[in-house]
Image (cartoon, rainbow, N blue to C red):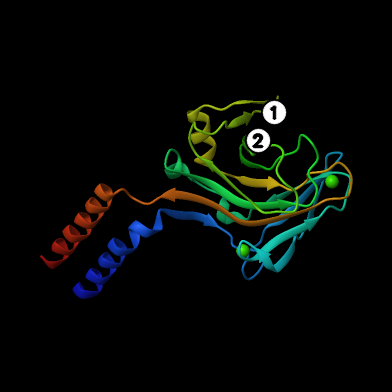
C-alpha cells in the first residue's frame, strides 16, 4: 500500500511540469462523434442532426464535419460532459477548439457560447479567418478576452462576476457552424476542450503534504 502510494505521488510530481493544463471536458473525435449534435434553427424551428465523423484530416485524426442542409443557422452542440460547474477554471483556464470552414462570409467569425438559465455567454473569434484551413481558437476565462453576455436583449460586455456565474452552472455549450447565408458551406470541428491549469508548485507541495498526512493518520 505504502509503495503504491509513493509511486502515485512520484508519477504526479514527474508528470506535472510537462502537462501545463488539465482537461475538464474534452472531445478529440478520434473514434466517433462523441455524442455531439448539430442544432439547426430555421424561423424559430429547431431540428437536430447527427454531424458527420471524419476518421482522418483533423488535428490530428478524427473530427466532426457538417455540410449545411437548410437556409437556417446551425451550431455544434456539446454533450453532457461539457455541462456543469467549471468555476474552478475561471482565472485559471479557458476553452479551446480547432475549427475550419470552406466558405466564410464577410462579418462571420467562429464563436463559443455557454448557456445558463437562458443567459448566453459569448466568446468571439477573429474576423477574416482563412477558408479551408484549421484554426486553433482559445479563450481564457478571464478579462483578457472580450467576453459578451446576452440576457435576451442583445450582447453587452460581460464582467468577471457574470463570466463566473455562467461557468459555475453550464447547461449548454455551442460552437459556430453556420458561416454563409445560403445552403453552401461545410464546417469542421476538432478538440473542443474546457481546461484548467495544473496546480502551481506550492499547491502541489500542499497536495503532497496532505497525502502524506493522510498516510500518517491511517497508520495510527
Ligand atoms: Ca481529432
Ligand atoms: Ca449556410
Identity of the residue drawn at 61% across and 61% down: 59
On residue 152, which mark appears?
1
Disc 2 marks which residue? Answer: 118
**Which circle's residue, 1 or 2, is located before the other in the chain?**
2
Q: Nearer the viewer, residue 3 or 142?
A: 142
Q: Viewed as shown, does residue 208 lie left or right of 69? A: left
Q: Viewed as shown, does residue 119 lie left or right of 65? A: left
| Quadrant the C terminus occupies | bottom left
Expressed as whole percent of the image width and height from the top left, the position of residue 79 reads 63, 55
Q: Nearer the viewer, residue 175 or 45?
A: 175
Kindly state the secondary structure of the residue where label 2 is placed. loop
| Contact (Cβ within 8 Å) of mark 1 with mark 2 | yes
Residue with the most extreme front position = 130
Q: CA distance from mark 1 to mark 2?
A: 8 Å
Identity of the residue drawn at 61% across and 30% down: 149
Classify 72 as above or below 143: below
Q: Viewed as shown, does residue 49 lie left or right of 122? A: right
Q: Viewed as shown, does residue 105 lie left or right of 59? A: right
Give the crowd class for mark 1: few <14, some 14-19, many >=20 residues within 10 Å.
Answer: few
Expressed as whole percent of the image width and height from the top left, the position of residue 37 reads 71, 56
Expressed as whole percent of the image width and height from the top left, the position of residue 147 reads 57, 32
Does the closest atom of ligand 2 sit within 8 Å of the Cβ of label 2? no
Does the closest atom of ligand 2 sit within 8 Å of the Cβ of label 1? no
Amino acid at each position: 500500500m505504502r509503495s503504491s502510494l509513493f509511486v502515485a505521488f512520484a508519477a504526479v510530481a514527474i508528470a506535472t511540469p510537462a502537462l501545463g493544463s488539465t482537461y475538464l471536458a474534452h472531445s478529440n473525435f478520434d473514434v466517433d462523434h462523441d455524442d455531439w449534435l448539430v442544432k439547426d434553427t430555421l424561423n424559430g424551428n429547431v431540428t437536430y442532426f447527427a454531424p458527420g465523423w471524419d476518421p482522418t484530416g483533423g488535428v490530428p485524426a478524427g473530427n466532426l464535419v457538417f455540410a449545411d442542409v437548410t437556409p437556417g443557422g446551425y451550431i455544434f452542440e456539446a454533450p453532457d460532459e461539457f455541462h456543469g460547474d467549471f468555476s474552478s477554471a475561471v482565472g485559471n483556464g479557458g476553452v479551446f477548439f480547432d475549427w475550419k470552414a470552406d466558405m466564410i462570409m464577410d462579418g462571420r467569425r467562429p464563436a463559443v457560447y455557454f448557456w445558463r438559465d437562458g443567459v448566453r455567454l459569448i466568446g468571439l473569434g477573429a474576423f477574416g479567418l482563412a477558408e479551408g484551413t484549421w484554426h486553433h481558437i482559445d479563450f481564457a476565462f478571464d478579462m483578457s478576452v472580450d467576453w459578451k453576455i446576452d440576457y435576451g436583449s442583445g450582447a453587452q460586455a460581460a464582467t468577471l462576476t457574470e463570466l463566473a456565474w455562467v461557468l459555475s452552472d453550464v447547461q449548454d455549450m455551442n460552437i459556430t457552424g453556420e458561416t454563409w447565408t445560403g445552403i453552401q458551406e461545410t464546417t469542421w470541428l476538432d478538440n473542443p476542450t474546457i481546461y484548467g491549469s495544473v496546480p502551481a508548485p506550492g499547491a502541489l507541495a500542499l497536495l503532497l503534504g496532505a497525502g502524506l498526512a493522510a498516510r500518517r493518520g491511517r497508520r495510527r
